[in-house]
Image: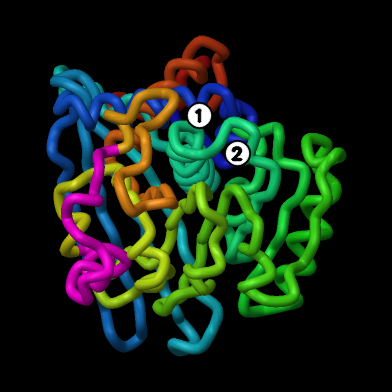
Amino acid sequence: MRILSEADIEALITFPAALDCADLAYRLHARGSAAPPVRGDLRHADPKAGCLVLAGAHGADTLAVKSNVHAYPDGPESPRLWGSLLTLWDWRRAEPRALLSARLFNEHRTAAGFAAGADRLAAADAGILALFGAGKSAPLTLRYLKAVRPSIREIRLAGRTPGRVQALAAQAALWPELADTRIVCAASPEAAVTGADLIATVTTSDRPVFPGAAAKPGACIILGGANRPEAREADDALMQRADLYLDARQGAIDKAGDIRLALESGALVPARIRAEIGAVPARGLPLSEGSDLRVFKSMGLAIQDVILAAHLVDRAEAEGRGLAVDLAGGGLLPC
């Protein structure tokens, strides 16, 4: 078995390959070629802690099992500690191929998924991007969205904590791919979205983060947070205007508050849930009657983990990267 560290993942992963893997995962899921995932959620109240286990497979050959663990050892208001590991299996032989440290892996997988969705839905000449959220998902989300829409010339950042938003702006200003891009900290949520061609939300908020009425007709919105039944990042005013696309239909209505709450209020009608993103043509679908926005609600798919992990392990084996371990006999093996 091969062990890949965070440094190994950073050396192996590339934006183009991660985008290709995300697009392939979406297409496999949409045509029913991915096995139904298995999801387990374990919680502990005092001290507060949790463990999310997600398993997915591609055919009878490749299986991935990922564990995301978090804890608040100094109380629920203290900083969260978290870690993630992914095991990639040769399922046919019931042998583990690799163990991946998955913190950076998760951020690339998630951001690449957002961008693959935006690539199918956003205007080809999108020039203004508004991003809500300045946490761990924000930096790579910016970079991947810029990768699929190099036409972006202005990025507006917004969040609940001004210091974190300013720190993200300073960090983004150092990236070579954004050298031609104006980066601003928005004065308000409304100011961030007014005139924006592409809007992405990667927050932990449980309530709408911007006024949907302020969104520009024709804009594309990526909803990447609020993956809980009672939480939402989009208000009813936004959902009343939207054609909605999902990474997966199964479970989304029950698990995603953005969808469930909008359906309950009547802001979203079922007919406007257009398709799974992997079934959308490269140039997108025309807007339905009465809609002037395209919204992609991303919950994340286990098949995304499977496809990206398999790509990275194939590359690691080809390049001799990582630590090879003999589980049966003990000891290290030459890479």
Element on which disc 2 rests = helix
Q: Nearer the viewer, residue 273 or 13?
A: 273
Q: Amino acid at mark 2?
A: Tyr
What residue did someone put label 2 on?
Answer: 144
Residue 183: give x, y in percent of width and height: 80, 55
Which badge, 1 or 2, is on the more N-terminal residue?
1
Identity, as a three-letter code, of the amino acid under mark 1:
Ala
Q: Are marks 1 and 2 in contact (CB under 8 Å)?
A: yes
Q: Position of residue 301 (x, y in %)?
A: 29, 43
Using the numbered discs, state the Cα–Cα distance from disc 1 to disc 2 in whole angstroms: 9 Å
User: Where is the N terminus found, in terms of image quarters?
Assistant: top left
Please tell me whether residue 167 is drawn above or below residue 109 in the rendered image. Answer: below
Q: Residue at x 54, y 61 (%)?
A: 215
Mark 2 Cα within 10 Å, few/some/many (few <14, many 20+)?
A: many
Circle 1: element type = helix
User: Of 226 and 40, which appears nearest the observer?
Assistant: 226
Report the mark closest to the observer, 1 or 2: 2
Image coordinates for residue 97, horizontal then vertical, percent: 33, 25
Q: Is residue 262 above or below residue 222?
A: below
For residue 18, the mark is 1
Q: Quadrant of residue 47?
A: bottom left
Residue 266 inside the magenta-drawn segment: yes
Of residues 311 and 286, the one drawn nearer to the viewer in this rendering: 286
Left or right: where 320 falls relative to 54: right
Magenta stretch, residue numbers: 255-276
- Which residue shows up at 52% across the image and 16% down it? 335
